[in-house]
Image (cartoon, rainbow, N blue to C red):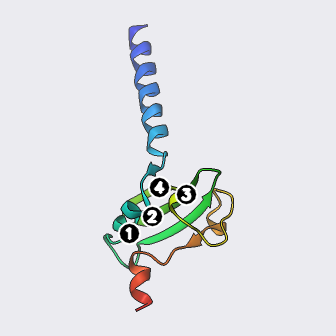
Amino acid sequence: MKKLTLVTLLFIAFAIMLIGCNQPLTVSKADLMEITRHWKEPKVAIWYYTGSDADYHYFRFVDLSETKDYRVKRVEMEIDAPYSLNKNQKNWRVMPWGPMSLQNK
C-alpha cells in the first residue's frame, strides 16, 4: 500500500511539473526584444506570434532542442492584425526576429 501511495505521489508531482512547463514566461517588450537576439542554430531558430487574449500577446521560440513560450502585455506592445490565441501552428505568424532579422539586411 505504501508503494502505491509513493508512486501515486510521484506521478502527481511529475504531472504538476509538466503543467508548469507549458506556462508562458511573462516578459516586458524590452526583455523579449533582447531575448530575440540570441539563438543556437540560425537554420532552425524561428519566432512565431501565436495570438492574443484580452491581456497579452503570445509568442513561441523554437530552436535546437528547445521550445519556449513568452507573453507580453498588450499595453506594452502593438501587433499588426492581432488574432485570437490558438494552438494550430498553421495559423501562427512568423516574426521577423532572431535569424529572420538578418535576412532583411
Taking the view exactly as shown, the residue that stands out farthest to the top is 1
Residue 76 x, y percent position in the rendering: 50, 60
Q: Is residue 37 above or below residue 13?
A: below
Q: Secondary structure at mark 1?
A: loop
Compared to residue 5, the image places residue 97 above or below, namely: below
Are the residues tagged 4 and 2 within 8 Å (C-beta)? yes
Amino acid beneath label 2: Phe
Q: Amino acid at mark 4?
A: Asp
Residue lying farthest front? Answer: 75
| Mark 1 / mark 4, whichever is N-terminal | 1
Q: Residue tagged by mark 1?
A: 36
Q: 10 Å neighbourhood of mark 4: few (<14), some, or many (≥20)?
A: some
Q: Amino acid at mark 3?
A: Val
Residue 70: % across, % down: 46, 55
**Disc 3 or disc 4, which is closer to the eye?**
3
Seen as rendered, the residue at the extreme bottom is 105
Residue under label 2, please give it. 61
